[in-house]
Image (spheres, rainbow, N blue to C red):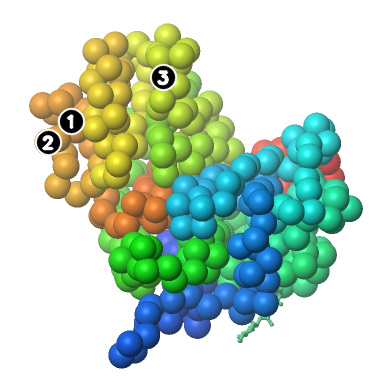
Amino acid sequence: HKGNYEHYMQKEIHEQPESLTTTMRGRLIRGGTCKAKTVLLGGLKDHLKTIRRSRRIVFIGCGTSYNAALAARPILEELSGIPVTMEIASDLLDRQGPIYREDTAVFVSQSGETADTLHALEYALQNGALCVGITNTVGSAIARKTHCGVHINAGAEIGVASTKAYTSQIVVMAMLALAIGGDAISNQARREAIIDCLFDLPNKVRDVLKLDQEMKDLAKLLIAEQSLLMFGRGYNYATALEGSLKVKEVALMHSEGILAGEMKHGPLALVDESLPIVVIATRDACFSKQQSVIQQLHARKGRLIVMCSSGDATAVSLGGACRVIEVPRVEDCLQPVVNIVPLQLLAYHLTVLRGYNVDQPRNLAKSVTTE
Ligand code: UD1
Ligand code: F6R
């Protein structure tokens, strides 16, 4: 039940410290004397060898679940060394795209019942791929029909807009990357840093939830806008896509997530003094490139809202010209888990202020069981 919250979406956003804790419960091993820190995914342990031998890992999903896979793709490529490709389930089916016996196909679905994803699973099974599920619903069709998988254990998600499932999916896929990556010495420091960060991640999410009032104030400023762009890159391209999906599906405001590296190849033409733009510029290897994106958008008089790591406000705000959202810094590959939270809060408050139905957005269903 909703407890002290007015809407399920609000409750599910605020319970992410707890849902992330249950997602990781029993799966992170701290390591003792002489023992490395590691992860244990019970559902995959007998299949890791086969996954490591695969020629390619293909992520398949729809909507928010696709975005979560996109957020995890860089760390999976880094730790496994296996090429990772992305498929929107319906598009894979439309193209009848190639899937081979040597592929590991990973199906990401909160409900485990989405028709497009389920049909893509049947297609991949026919083509002989190893099929792995990442689902929130025990006993769901996708959980039953995959060869193996991981339950994200985020607890039932009732709001139509997916929030806590998204962050738990990313965490499970980061753990998947650690499990596939194995414990090569060359990766050890990186692995341990990620595992330490996972232990502390619920606390960091608790910290970022304190931005609730700040996001409500921002929503008041944006209440009457026609459109809101979000620019991200690297680990946080997914954050831009997912933030804008939340804004469009619940606040019923046009919003577009844009890969910042594509800015000059078209989107820059849209920028003028009236268009609000969120730029995600938290610290990682892409930071200096995002700083130059901020400068170029500012030169075109864009109304900028920059998300940066705590302490970086002066480094990104161009002398106070941009509104800033400061978030706690975590390990780069887990930063999308923290960064999405203010955007979930923004979408939530925009919806309430604009007077729309939060938990049942018009025209949408929680589980899309028809194509
Ligand atoms: C399992 C138990 C959990 C118990 C734990 C103790 C279940 C559902 N989970 O968790 O209650 O506390 O052992 O060790 O009984 N699977 C798929 N496709 C999917 C998702 C999962 O095939 O999309 C399969 C897995 O390969 C596995 C089984 O379902 O065989 C359970 O998966 P999961 O709950 O993630 O396993 P554990 O975390 O080990
Ligand atoms: C967005 C949303 C949808 C779902 C999509 C896939 O908030 O809820 O985009 O993510 O319909 O659903 P699942 O994950 O159940 O396969």
Relative image position of residue 370 (x, y in whole percent) = 84, 45
- Badge 3: few (under 14), some or many (20 or more) residues near its Cα, within 10 Å? some
In the rendered view, tell whether residue 5 sits above or below residue 326. Answer: below
63 sits to left or right of 283: right
Relative image position of residue 50 (x, y in whole percent) = 68, 66
Q: Residue 316 versus residue 93: which sits nearer the camera?
A: 93
Relative image position of residue 34 (x, y in whole percent) = 33, 87
For image coordinates 51% across by 37% down, the residue present is 241
Q: Which residue is mark 1?
A: 317
Q: How many marks?
A: 3
| Three-letter code, disc 1 | Ser
Q: Residue furthest bottom?
A: 33
In the rendered view, tell whether residue 309 sits above or below residue 248. Answer: below
In the rendered view, tell whether residue 88 sits above or below residue 162. Answer: above
Location of residue 86 (image quadrant): top right
Asked if the residues shown at circle 1 and circle 2 are in contact, with their CB atoms under 8 angstroms apart, the answer is yes
Name the N-terminal-most of marks 3 and 1.
Answer: 3
Circle 1 — which element? loop
Q: Quadrant of the N terminus?
A: bottom right
Q: Which residue is mark 2?
A: 314
In the rendered view, tell whether residue 210 sits above or below residue 346. Answer: below
For image coordinates 85% across by 50% down, the residue present is 127
Q: Which residue is mark 3?
A: 263
Q: Residue 96 versus residue 66: which sits nearer the camera?
A: 96
Q: How many angstroms separate mark 1 from mark 2 (CA)? A: 5 Å
- Badge 2: few (under 14), some or many (20 or more) residues near its Cα, within 10 Å? few
